[in-house]
Amino acid sequence: MVIKVFLASSSGSTAIKKKQQDVVGFLEALKVDYTQLDIACNEENRMWMRQNVPVDKKPTNGIPLPPQIFNEDSYCGDYDTFFDAKEDNSVYAFLGLPPPPGSKANAQEEDEQEEADEDRDEEAEVQEDEEEEEEEEEEEDMEETQEEEAE
């Protein structure tokens, strides 16, 4: 899976440049494999990006601005949604990538899995105990019945 970041190499907007740098810098810091696709110099990239941003995610003028982020052909989001994911510590989920081994998100998933396993084990123990109690009650009932029949 390759993350695609659509950028404009020659943007006149300092805000867009800053947002692009923020996204790219953060992906590099996380060592995420990504590809930069320039929409300023490549009309195919510009058209692909515009066609593949979902309608409900496009701005009111209908033209999405860079940076736009995709996982292969799957739309992840724009700068604002990336920033929100960054703030929530959920960038890997935002990108549709598994968290790296040893990461906080991965450790949390492992903890949740361990808790689920422990819960399952406890349920199995309770069920075994209940079955043993039922068997003991049946044995006692049988013994009582046999004693009554013997009398």
Image (cartoon, grey):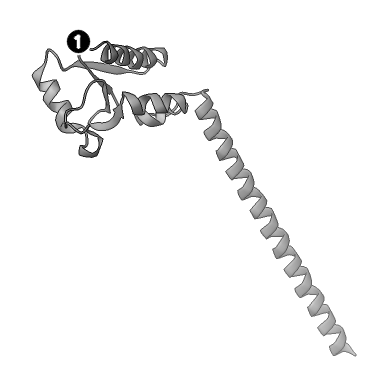
Q: Is residue 113 above or below residue 145?
A: above
Looking at the picture, how far across and down is residue 74, in whole percent? 26, 33
Q: Nearer the viewer, residue 51 or 114?
A: 51
Residue lying at 61% horizontally and 41% vertically, measured from the top left: 115
The one of 129 and 85 positioned closer to us in this rendering: 85
Task: Name the quarter where the N terminus is drawn.
Answer: top left
- The C terminus is located in which quarter? bottom right
Q: Residue at x 61, y 49 (%)?
A: 120
Amino acid carrying mark 1 in the image: Gly
The residue to which callout 1 is attached is 12
Q: Residue furthest left?
A: 43
- Seen as rendered, the residue at the extreme right is 151
- Where's residue 60, x and y in %? 20, 33
Res 146 visible: yes
* Number of numbered markers: 1
The local secondary structure at tag 1 comes to loop
Q: Residue at x 41, y 12 (%)?
A: 29
Picture residue at 28% right of the left edge, 23% below the top: 2
Above or below for 61 versus 7? below
| Left-right relation of 74 to 145 | left
Asked whether residue 91 is in view, the answer is no
Q: In the visual, does 80 lie left or right of 48?
A: right
Residue 52 is situated, as x and y percent measured from the top left of the image, at: 18, 32
Q: Nearer the viewer, residue 108 or 124?
A: 108
Q: Residues within 10 Å of mark 1 (few under 14, many from 20)?
A: few
